[in-house]
Image (cartoon, rainbow, N blue to C red):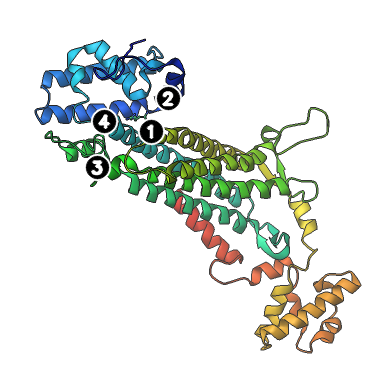
Amino acid sequence: KEGKLWGGRFEESVTDAVEKFSESISFDKALYKHDIMGSRAHATMLAKQGLMTSSDRDCILQGLDEIERQIEAGEFVWRTDREDVHMNIEAALTDLVGEPAKKLHTARSRNDQVVTDLRLWCRDAITEILDRIKRLQVALVCLAIKNEGLIVPGYTHLQRAQPVLLQHLLLAYVEQLERDSSRFINCNDRLNFCPLGACALAGTGLPIDRFMTAKALGFTAPMRNSIDAVSDRDFVLEFLSANSIAAVHLSRLGEEWVLWASEEFGFLIPSDAVSTGSSIMPQKKNPDPMELVRGKSARVVGDLVTLLVLCKGLPQAYNRDLQEDKEPLFDSVKTIIGMLEVTTEFAQNITFNSERIGRALPAGHLDATTLADYLVKKGIPFRTSHDIVGRSVALCLSKGCQLLELSLDDLRSASPVFEEDVYEFLGVENSVKKFSSYGSTGPKCVAEQLGFWISKLDIN
Ligand code: ARG
């Protein structure tokens, strides 16, 4: 143990309890790559600005290379008494190259350093998430391609509503995921500004070049206000919000597929590779992965709430509370990536049971709205046709039959407008074919949607 970590002003080192309570190295070492990246850019800038010699800079850059190598080889010793990733790396650099390393922290504070690392880390995490979202979209589109023409009951209030193409339903999730992607991209555009050089909060009187470091690190520009730069974690809040919305989308898909895999629905059969059994009930085959997708969405939402509550009481500028931003951020990202990966694998390992789905279609009068539209085409006001079809449905209920099983006389007892051509509108196949509005479930409209996604996602 090194003793007085903060230099001259201190007479003793912190107690063991305080050290253990305050350390962040156990989790923020995940930032090492970005911390080293930031230090490289900072040292290069300091040398260019005459704040260190080029030989100091070269020592530092070589030392940082060696430290990165050691970390990646698992040889680096992370020390709790050095508190966090920033001090671990800087102190190890000093151990390694001596005097020159003492110049690295010129015009820099851990306050601007940590938030620079964090923004760089988020940028990489977003790239990874975008890739996983795309893979899931591809899996869903492939599933749609495999199930061309399959009609399923569409639900509202979880009650039979209208017949839809399964492709249409799957592509609804693809759309939702696309908006998720755009949220991540927006979030990335807003977070990609550089806090480095804000120092503790006020900036510095030393002649640094913040534009140079911002550019070297791939940021759009340095942040305009040094107090803002070290204070806020709104970019993490936005990121975790985007994660939460995506997690909620996945949770809903999970819920639907769990339901569809039940004996009661029987619409979906997961392969054994994505199912688990029971330790007591020998017959069981459970869709656990999608249940866990649903379940883990709770963590992602919880991580967002943690951060919202963390930030809400903080005055400007940096407060140590902000150290608590990392674990929810890391957890949220790890969880959403796992959810995306497993949902993709699940999608690649299910079949839709067309026989069971086919048997389910006649129930629930899914074609009733199409029948009402038939009457509208014959000139009946919609409210009147709604009532007429309602009476026809009531007749079906009393006879225990479907609309298409009613005779023309039966139908005419509700309205004389019905003619022989009404049977072209009845039954789920006929009904689905009648949809023609933009974005509807009609086969032509769905084929257009599918074509759009096949080319957008570059599927063979
Ligand atoms: N480990 C700290 C954090 O994660 C780094 C910044 C600490 N700054 C300070 N002045 N104590 O926020």
Q: Are marks 2 and 3 in contact (CB under 8 Å)?
A: no
Tag 1 residue: 320
Q: Quadrant of the N terminus?
A: top left
Mark 4 or mark 3, which is nearer the start of the sequence? 4
Q: State how far apart marks 2 and 4 are (Cα).
A: 18 Å
Instruction: Out of 376 and 52, give the one closest to the viewer.
Output: 52
- Is the residue indicated by label 1 positioned so its CB lies within 8 Å of ligand 1? yes
In the visual, does 232 lie left or right of 276? Answer: left
- CB of residue at label 4: within 8 Å of ligand 1? yes
Q: Residue 152: percent from the left, percent from the top?
A: 70, 58
- Rendered-image quarter of ligand 1: top left
Alpha carbon distance from label 1 to label 4: 13 Å
Q: In which image quadrant can residue 76 be found? A: top left
Residue at (11% x, 30% y) in the render: 48
Residue at numbered disc 3? 226
Q: Is residue 343 left or right of residue 313?
A: right
Q: Amino acid at mark 1?
A: Arg
Q: Which mark is residue 22?
A: 2
Q: Is residue 297 left or right of residue 243?
A: right
Q: Nearer the viewer, residue 122 or 86?
A: 86
Front of the two marks 2 and 3: 2
Q: Residues within 10 Å of mark 2 (few under 14, many from 20)?
A: some
User: Residue farthest to the left?
Assistant: 50
Residue type at the position of mark 2: Ser
Q: SS of the residue at dot 2?
A: helix
Are the two marked residues, 1 and 2, in contact with CB atoms closer than 8 angstroms?
A: yes
